[in-house]
Structure formats: structure tokens, C-alpha cells
Image (cartoon, helix red, strand yellow):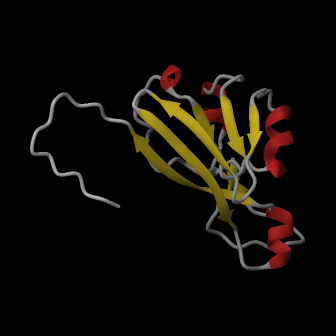
Amino acid sequence: MRPNPNEMFDLVKGPNIKPQPRFGALPAFDLRAITATLISHSHPDHFDAAAEAKIASDMAMITTEHDKQTLVKKGFSNIIALPWGEQMVFPTKSGQITITAVPAEHSENAEILKILGPGNGYFFEFVAVIIAGPCTGLAIPSR
């Protein structure tokens, strides 16, 4: 049960809570291979009970300062608040991934924003290190 994220609601009464089905089944994957979970905001249409049940409580979770305590109350222990404009770097087997938090607002209405709170969008930069054997006649473009 959760509100429809596309439905407007009366600010006094709050959203109309009703069943909201998933748009499709999640593909099967091994959660142990996941380094971190990025959460735009902790509303149930973005981070639902199914996700909460499957993610290890000690997995790194990147979110807003606003949602950090919500996740602590849900039992998660490795929560990193990433403010807008700040970056985190994750090493990979062949390089690194830099994640930058950017503003993601729910509404242009200031009153609704007060209720919903801030959200994060994320910009990803991938840098790979490739080591090759002898390369003759290889032209490397300059930046």
C-alpha cells in the first residue's frame, strides 16, 4: 500500500494510499555482487518493502541527509548522506566510478517540497584503466 506518485493530493488530507503494483518484475541478480545502493529518497515508490527485505542491513546506502534517520530506523547501519554537489569514489577491478549527488526535486511547489523533502539524483563518471601489450602504430587521440 502506497500513494500513487503521479496523483495530486490535498495537502491537508495527504495522499490517497492504495495498492500500487510494480511496473514489472525485477530481473534476477546476485545481491552479494552489489557494492552500494543509491536511494533518491525513501518514499515507498522508490524504496519499497520488497527492496528493504532483500538488501543486507550493512550494505552501503547512499542517500540524502533527510532520509538517513529513516533508514537507520528501518535497521540499516551503513548509511552515507551525500549532499548535492558532493562526490564519492568507488574503486572497481579496472578503474573507478565517481558518483556526484545532484538535486532531484519532487515539485516546483514550495509547500509540497516541505512535506516531501529533498531528493538526490546521481551523476556517474566511469574511468577505466586498460593495460595492453606491445602496440605499434597505435594512434592515441589527445583530449
Q: Is residue 132 above or below residue 114?
A: above
Quarter of the view holding residue 120: bottom right
Q: Name the side, left or right, on which 129 lies relative to 42.
A: left
User: Is 130 left or right of 15, judged from the image as shown?
Assistant: left
Q: Quadrant for residue 59, please give it.
A: top right
Q: Nearer the viewer, residue 28 or 87?
A: 87
Judging depth in this view, the residue of 18 and 127 nearest the camera is: 127
Residue at figure coordinates x 65%, y 22% from the top left? 56
**Quadrant in which the C terminus is drawn:** bottom left
Give the residue at the far bottom of this rendering.
109
- Residue 64, position in %: x, y? 76, 50
Compared across the picture, whether 58 is left or right of 29 comes to right
The residue at the point 52 percent across, 28 percent down is: 34
Q: Residue furthest left?
A: 137
Instruction: Indicate the position of residue 118 as horizontal and vertical percent values.
Output: 77, 61
Residue under the image location 74 percent in, 62 percent down: 16
The one nearer the camera, 54 or 35, is: 35
Task: Write the residue at 85% across / 75% down.
Answer: 111
Q: How many marks?
A: 0
Left or right: 23 in relation to 111 = left
- Residue 138 at least partly seen: yes
Tell me where residue 125 appears, x and y as whole percent.
48, 50
Kindly give the residue lying farthest to the top in the view shown. 32
Position in image of residue 82 (x %, y %): 73, 48
Q: Can residue 14 be seen at all in this image of the molecule?
A: no
Using the image as rendered, state which of residue 24 and residue 43 is in the foreground. Answer: 43
